[in-house]
Every structure is written in structure tokens, then in C-alpha cells.
Amino acid sequence: MTTTRPLAVCFGGGGLFGIAYLLGVSEALVDGGIDLGTAPSIATSAGTWAAGALALGLRWEQTIAVIGADVPRLPDPRPGRLRKVAAEIFGEQRAPTMRAVVCSLPGLRRDVLSGADYPIADLVAASSAVPGLLSPHRVGNTWYVDGGLRSMASPDRADTAENLLVLAPIAGPMFGPAGRIAERVLRREVGHWQRANPMGAFWLIRPNRAIASLARLPNNLFDLDRAKRCYELAYAQGTGILHRWRESRPPTPTGRATP
């Protein structure tokens, strides 16, 4: 008999700001006893940094907050630049429970790479290679660019589980109408996952208004000072979510967004 996993996680994209948001919320949940590090995950762009850190038990203050100043904010076409930064954090370690969404060249087909097959640094470099900002990254015989070009989170590619936790830095109040559109796309993709997993529940977490106010323009997503403030607010949001979950009997209804 097949045993369904209790939890799968989907980490969306959002630049350095997104990494801070994802790790802030996730670390609060981990500190509260929710083991995100061993849960199967699907991650896109910024989400790969967070998923890799959680899989290895690394914290924001130990890794991204320190190395963040070296993350490119302006066009940097040097091949291997992003992988070099990622390798400073993750080395050549792999995370078998992690998968990364990428877009293959030349057709921009949405593909998924497994952490069982490649080092985290390769998954990060491939999924985070924003066209016009960073050079494409080759994994095996294929060149890849940022997975967010096709979907900011790809929850439709998430693992089968009793519960799917979707953490989406670019949704809800982020960027006004653009964030609302992103959330509609996100929910449509979650609908695909639900049809394939009719017994599964999903939980959507995205920035509250205080966090969204830190990044009003797209270039704010690559500002290290804003990211550090985002992390602190995201950790507080994650703590509040955890408290509400514990107090809720039965738990929050399926599909409810957590503010």
C-alpha cells in the first residue's frame, strides 16, 4: 500500500527579498516544530536558495544575510558567476528531497531538475539565471534560465501529499494589481495539483501588507537592506501563523490564504 507524505512544500521566486521572506517564515515554522527541511519540495528561482538552505539546516543569518552583498544586482554576464556564489553557501552538497523549476534553452520549456541528480549550487544557478541579468547556466548538456519566466512557483508540479504548503513571495499585496494577478495564476496552478490530489489540502502563505510595503518596485527585490528587514517581519509573520494554526481546531479550511 502506498503511503502519502504528510507534507510537501512549494517555494516561489522573488529575488533576494524573496529569499529573505521564504527563510523568515520557514525558520519560524521550523522553530515551532514543523520539519520543512526533510519535506519534499519544488522550488523556483529565489525558492531554490531557501529550499537548499532548509534541506541542509542552514539559517538566514549564517548564509544569505552574509553572502547577500555578493549576489548580483546589476547585469553580470560572466559565466558561472551565480554558481560561484551559491557554492560558497552550499558547496557541492545535494538535497535529494529538493527539485528545481527551470526553463530550458532555446525554447523556454518548463523543466524540473532533481536535487538527487545534481548539486544544490547547480539547481540554484540554473533556476535563478534571470535573462538580461545573469548568464544562462548549463546542467548536463542543456542550458537553463530562471524558472520564474514560466511560473513564479509551479505548485502544479509539487509532490503528492496530504498537505501542500505554498510559500509565495510575489502574491497578495505585493506590487498591487501585479501581485493579485500572480496570486490568481498561483491558485489556478494549485487547482491542477488538487485535481491530481483530491484528498490533499493546500495552505497559501504570502507577504502581509507591512512586508509588501518594503518592496514597491521590482528593483527593490535585490536590495540587501530591504531583504534584511523583510526577514525580520517574515519571521514574525511565520510565528503568528504558527500560533493561529495551533489554536485552530479543526485547522484552517483548505485553500485559505494566510495573511
Image: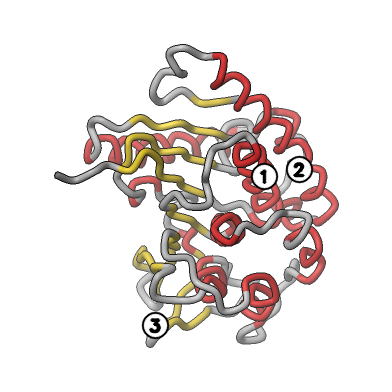
Residue toward you, 200 or 72: 200
Callout 2: SS: helix
Across and down, in percent, residue 53 comes to 61, 59
For the C terminus, the quadrant is top right
* Total numbered badges shown on the rendered structure: 3
Across and down, in percent, residue 191 comes to 31, 35
Mark 2 and mark 1 residues within 8 Å of each other at the beta carbon:
yes
Pointer 1 local density, CA inside 10 Å: few below 14, some 14–19, many at least 20: many
Across and down, in percent, residue 65 comes to 79, 58
- Quadrant of the rendered structure where residue 224 is? bottom right
Q: Residue at x 55, y 74 (%)?
A: 93
Callout 1: SS: helix
Name the residue carrying label 2: 230
Q: Amino acid at mark 1?
A: Tyr
Q: Is residue 32 above or below residue 66?
A: above
Callout 3: SS: strand
Name the residue carrying label 1: 21
Disc number at residue 100? none
* First of labels 2, 1 by sequence position: 1
* First of labels 3, 2 by sequence position: 3
Distance (Cα) linking label 3 and label 2: 35 Å
Residue toward you, 49 or 225: 49
Please identify, in this view, whether the residue under mark 1 or under mark 3 is nearer the observer: 1
Name the residue carrying label 3: 142
Q: Amino acid at mark 2?
A: Cys
Q: Residue at x 70, y 28 (%)?
A: 209
* First of labels 1, 3 by sequence position: 1
Q: Residue at x 39, y 82 (%)?
A: 142
